[in-house]
Image (cartoon, rainbow, N blue to C red):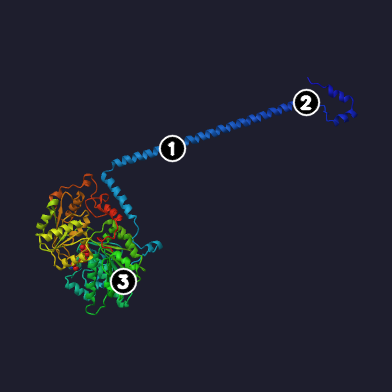
Amino acid sequence: MESVPKRRRLQRSPSPTYKFDDEDGSFEPYIPVSERRQQKLLKLKSWGTNTDKQRARKQQEELDEREDAQKEEEIRREKARMERTLLMEAQEVHSKKAVEDAKKTDSEKAEEVDAEILEAIKSRRKLASDMELAKGIYYTESLTTSWKPPKYILQRSPEQHQKIRDKFHILVDGEDIPPPIEQFADMKIPEPILQYLKINRIVTPTPIQLQGIPTAFSGRDLIGIAFTGSGKTLAFCLPLIMMALEEELKLPFIRGEGPVGIILCPSRELANQTFENVMTWCAALAKEGRYPQLNTLLCIGGISMNEQSHVMNKGLHIVVATPGRLIDMLEKKRFTFNNCKYLCMDEADRMIDLGFEDDVRNIMSFFKRQRQTLLFSATMPRKIQDFAQESLIKPILVNVGRAGAANLDVLQVVEYVKQEAKMVYLLECLQKTPPPVIIFSENKNEVDDIQEYLLLKGVEAVAIHGSKSQEERQYAIKSFKSGAKDVMVASGVASKGLDFNDIQHVIIFSMPKEIEDYVHQIGRTGRSGKTGIATTFVNMNTPEQTLLDLKYLLMEAGQKVPPFLSTIDDPRAAQGGSLKGCSVCGGLGHGISNCPKLEDAKRREMASHRTADDGGY
Ligand SMILES: Nc1ncnc2c1ncn2[C@@H]1O[C@H](COP(=O)(O)OP(=O)(O)OP(=O)(O)O)[C@@H](O)[C@H]1O
């Protein structure tokens, strides 16, 4: 029920009170009940509407929240599912690999390891100067020379060229290979040199010469591999002499000019020997006065360069050097490589193994123009061939026989001699042939002991090893070469490249760990087509792997394999794997992962490579 009395009263006394009441603000207009009811209803209605909206909003919010929570849950679940899948996949892959690995034979696993090691080796820097590498200088074309083979040889078909190569077991690889030439006269070698060679019983080219010389004469980069004593020295010296001669004839060299080319050797002894060869060939060339005198400088550690000032005071054509002294001379600007365009490395694999790689790059950085690069050795493992091929310009590989194979003109005898019996047996062994004989030992002290023992027994013996002074080394080589001494006892230093006259017998007192060293050591005999004997002492101190390498090498050369070697089984054969030779050292009895050379390489890396033994400085 509504109360109305106040409003009824006001309606009865109208205007003055009305005005007054309005002024104090207490006036309230009358709203009819029906209208008020209507208003209330509307208000109530509107309240109802707001509550609904709020509820709806709330409901919506709850819905949204629920949806969000659901979405989050889904994402969480998906993530968990993904993680589970990846984990499962990883587990699956892992278990699959484990199953595959289990299926692999030991030899397959070993091959995988070998491949990984080889890959790591391959990643070494190119054999080019740092400047060339930094500037991205990359030559694509070989040097051109004025030399051409005679027309009638050029007219032969590729098949005819190949027939000649096959006849001499020459393997070649590369683009546009120059033809093999079977006669020195056809190589257009100056007559005085031909005459000199003839007098020294060098009448027809050896296989490495008949393919290597035309290749080098054509200006091509070359990797020459041929067995010990097969005449590699002439193959890389003659092209340089010809190149120097041509330059000198064009415009004679004056003081401060030259050299035209350089021959790098890993030891002083080898450099000295090559220097003497070049000197005699140049002297022969100039003898009759038809050709000019070419000047050659020997640049090795242990000698005074002042002694050669007479050469330095003239134009310089050829330098024969060891890396250390050469760098020293170049840094001191005693001569420059401004006009140098021929670089040959003898015993190239040894140069690289000895850690001369950076020195070689350093030497290359002194060249001011494109050069012709040649690498020669009797042993050139696959990894060095690959490395070299990447570093040369359109190189040609000339390979006579397997790289690292023994010279077939050497009769190889392997004898089991107990350690304590070696010295006494050595005397007996010396009776096998007349002198000259070389005895090799891996140990400097042992070299001295053997020499002392032999001297006591009245044998005329000299000794050479890295701890001897340069004079002592020179004396030993000179007196042995001249025939004044019958026996030379030597450490590895004398094994590679040294060419002594008609060595009858090589005795290997202690078998080197690396089969390559053995190949070089026995290679001091059986040179230039003559035969020789090599006797090797082995015993229980010789590692089985070395014996296995030796066994395979004897088999390859068709030599007698003694019973104690025949009984050594190749562990790789038992595993059913391949019996491929090691591409790091060329040994036939093991894979890369067991290569003794890799261990040695690590050792050498740590040691300073400019020791007296390597003669590099
Ligand atoms: N065409 C040839 N005919 C006969 N004898 C040769 C010929 N060429 C070189 N000779 C002689 O063969 C001997 C060995 O030559 P060289 O020293 O060049 O061999 P090498 O292949 O360098 O051996 P190593 O790998 O041991 O260094 C030398 O005395 C040399 O005079």
Task: Give SS at disc 3.
Answer: loop
- Describe residue 284's horizontal placement relative to residue 101 as left or right: left
In this rendering, does residue 372 appear at all?
A: no
In this rendering, does residue 575 appear at all?
A: yes
Cα separation, mark 2 vs mark 1, equals: 69 Å
The three-letter code of the residue at mark 3 reads Val
Quarter in which the C terminus is drawn: bottom left
Cα separation, mark 1 vs mark 3, equals: 69 Å
Cα separation, mark 3 vs mark 2, equals: 125 Å
Give coordinates of residue 491: x percent, y percent.
Answer: 20, 59
Task: Give SS at disc 2.
Answer: helix
Q: Earlier in the sequence, mark 3 or mark 2?
A: 2
According to the image, label 3 marks what residue? 260
Quadrant of the image occupied by residue 453: bottom left
Give coordinates of residue 376: x percent, y percent.
Answer: 26, 63
Residue drawn at (10%, 55%), measured in percent from left and top?
424
- The numbered mark at residue 601 is none
According to the image, label 2 marks what residue? 36
Q: Does residue 432 lie above or below 257 as drawn?
A: above
Residue drawn at (23%, 45%), measured in percent from left and top?
576
Quadrant in which ligand 1 is drawn: bottom left
Query: Closer to us: mark 3 or mark 2?
Result: 3
Q: How many marks?
A: 3
According to the image, label 1 marks what residue? 83
Residue contact at pointers 2 and 1, CB within 8 angstroms:
no
Within-10-Å neighbours for mark 3: few <14, some 14–19, many 20+ = many
